[in-house]
Structure formats: structure tokens, C-alpha cells
Image (cartoon, rainbow, N blue to C red):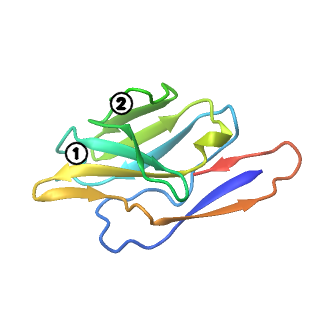
Amino acid sequence: MCFSLFPGSWAQSALTQPASVSGSPGQSITISCTGTSSDVGGYNAVSWYQQHPGKAPKLMIYEVNKRPSGVSNRFSGSKSGNTASLTISGLQAEDEADYYCSSHRRGGTFHSGPGSWGIETQTCPGLSASLLF
């Protein structure tokens, strides 16, 4: 199967993520989260969440690169300048989900928007199965 996530609208969003990132099972993907020097670039307070349809968001990364207990080490975080990144290595079908980031900013916390992604499942040709996040 192919899994595709498409961005929706989130007018309040202060952080931006790409519309899609593709990779095949077993490979690695990196999802970026771009902000400004007032949020992502100014604090080591970036978090990443994973949300499966109908379920509550799960914290995957906090303080840029720290994993909560129980989160697979296939998930890693990093930051360079005003852009934070979530890398998922050894992609598995269970990784198919919504991913979004959040960052502290003076006056509050800003995020890329839980619920700002929709999901569509489609058939992949042959063995070229891919995961699109």
C-alpha cells in the first residue's frame, strides 16, 4: 500500500512543514519544521508529535533531540538555525501517521497544526511501495 498525507489549512500556524516527504519501507525520511529566530531558532524547545487517525497525539521528541521512554530510537531530532528536523530511519508501516512539530516562543507555544493533515490510502504499483508523510 501507499500512504499519503496531505496538508490542510491551519491559519494560526507559525511553523511550516513540507506538503509531503516520501520514502520506501526500510529507508529513512526527514521531515522539516521551519520557524524563525523567535521560536525554533531561539530556543532548544522543539517537540515532535505523532498522531494516528482517531488517536491522541504521542510525544516522540522533546527539547530538539530527546526521546521519551518507550519511543523507538528510529526516531531522532535535530536543529540547524531556524529549522528543526525529525528523521525516521528504517521506515515501517506503523510509522504511517500525522507528524507535527511545536516550538516555544515568548508568549506561548506555536505548532504546525494538529489536525492540519488529511490522509489518503492508495494502491502502489508492484514493489515500489512508499510512505508519504
Nearer to us in this view, 23 or 74: 74
Above or below — where is 71 with respect to 15?
above
Above or below — where is 19 with respect to 47?
below
Confirm or deny contact between disc 2 and disc 1 (CB under 8 A). no
Q: Percent from the top left, x then y, of residue 60?
A: 41, 38
Query: Which label's residue is closer to the chain start, 2 or 1?
Result: 1
Q: Secondary structure at mark 2?
A: loop
Q: Residue at x 66, y 47 (%)?
A: 131
Q: Secondary structure at mark 1?
A: loop
Q: Percent from the top left, x then y, of residue 111?
A: 31, 57
Q: Residue at x 68, y 31 (%)?
A: 26
Residue 4 occupies quadrant: bottom right
Residue carrying label 2 = 68
- Nearer the observer, disc 2 or disc 1? 2
Kind of residue at badge 2: Pro
Kind of residue at badge 1: Gly
Does the rendering let one see residue 129? yes
Q: Percent from the top left, x then y, of residue 52?
A: 54, 52
Q: Percent from the top left, x then y, of residue 106?
A: 10, 54
Q: Residue at x 85, y 42 (%)?
A: 127
Q: Which mark is residue 41?
A: 1
Q: Is residue 50 left or right of residue 131?
A: left
